[in-house]
Amino acid sequence: MPTIPNAPEGQKGSVDGTEKVPVDGSFFIIISQVAEYIRTLAQTLTNKTLTTPTIGDFTNAQHDHAGPASGGGPIASYTIPRTVVDGLTLSNNGSDANNDIDIAAGQAVDDGLTDNMILAAALTKRLDANWAVGTNQGGLDTGAEANSTWYHVWLIMRPDTGVVDVLFSLSATAPTMPANYTKKRRIGAIKNDSSGNILPFLQYGDEFIWTSPPAVDVGVTNLSTSRVDYTLPSVPTGVIVKVAFNVRIGGAASRLVYVSNPSLVDLAPSATVTPLAQIDSIGTNNCVMTMQVYTNISAQISARSSGTSTDFFVAVLGWVDPRGKR
């Protein structure tokens, strides 16, 4: 900004015809120049029809400063962070816990990273009825409810009206969407039992915890020196999660057991060589501990023992679901 020179004490004008006015006794403004600027601005606004700005108004060359990597660039080049998931906590309904799920108010960016979907008020959706818009309505995307089955919970939106709702689907990637609803984001998963009753759980952010672990997910006495993949019925399928579980091993002699994600390299447990082991039993004594391991999309973990005829028991406590954040 140009420096405004000090006005001589008491000076009222100058030979160029401009009037110099003291400001706070030490600065002055050249009135004629300011007046000309205001006149030009007023004329410009008079001749221009004002409209609501669009994204295109902010993406011209004047505002394109070296791209997003250096902090500039057209606004259109930015996307909403994938990590935007706030609220939307799932819980068993207090009146009909066997069939209904409550979804807290919240927001999440859709899985295409283009729209922020806001659920302004809590919803209750029924797993035992086909989807209809609104609270206390059905939530199932297609078909009839199946027993002993995982259902993924989706936040959905129809862009033409901005209405946001919730949908249940067998699919972790491609739910059957209602007409005109084209935006979606998976926000969790629920499971029912052999009678079709939704199993009780608690949710804390990305963490889901069984209020009562529903089953012994693995119970074998023949784990051996070859790796075996075990499916955990108490973990969602279709997504990779970090599962927390209690595990017990034992046998006729001391054993080491290495538990891992099935996608990792098949490695033998050892007391001295990588990868070592997470759990060992001494002599005929059992060893029990709590572990966390990533599953594959088939809800499986892998295990391998240092000896034959090893007891291997697993009971799932809960899991961490990134809900599309990666």
Image (spheres, rainbow, N blue to C red):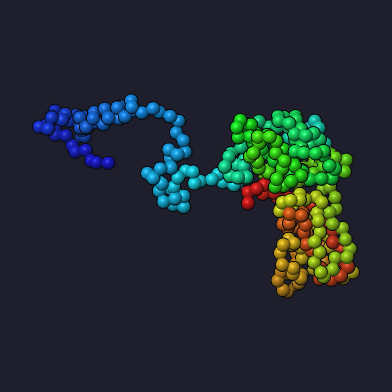
| Residue lying furthest left | 15
Quarter of the image holding residue 95?
A: top right
Placement of 200 over or under 226, stated as above or below: above
| Residue lying furthest front | 179
Q: The N terminus is located in which quarter?
A: top left
Q: Position of residue 146 (x, y in %)?
A: 84, 42
Q: Position of residue 141 (x, y in %)?
A: 75, 38
The answer to whether residue 100 of the structure is visible from this angle is no
In-front residue for pair 299/217: 299
Q: Residue at x 80, y 61 (%)?
A: 229
Q: Residue at x 59, y 47 (%)?
A: 82
Q: Residue at x 67, y 39 (%)?
A: 155
| Count of number-bearing discs | 0
Q: Position of residue 291 (x, y in %)?
A: 75, 57
| Residue lying furthest top | 46
Q: Is 82 left or right of 210, judged from the image as shown?
A: left
Placement of 120 over or under 304, stated as above or below: above
Q: Position of residue 305 (x, y in %)?
A: 81, 68
Quarter of the image holding residue 278?
A: bottom right
In-front residue for pair 181/295: 181
Placement of 106 over or under 322, stated as above or below: above
Q: Is 56 left or right of 148, judged from the image as shown?
A: left
Quarter of the image holding residue 143?
A: top right
Q: Is 178 left or right of 128, judged from the image as shown?
A: left
The answer to whether residue 216 of the structure is visible from this angle is yes
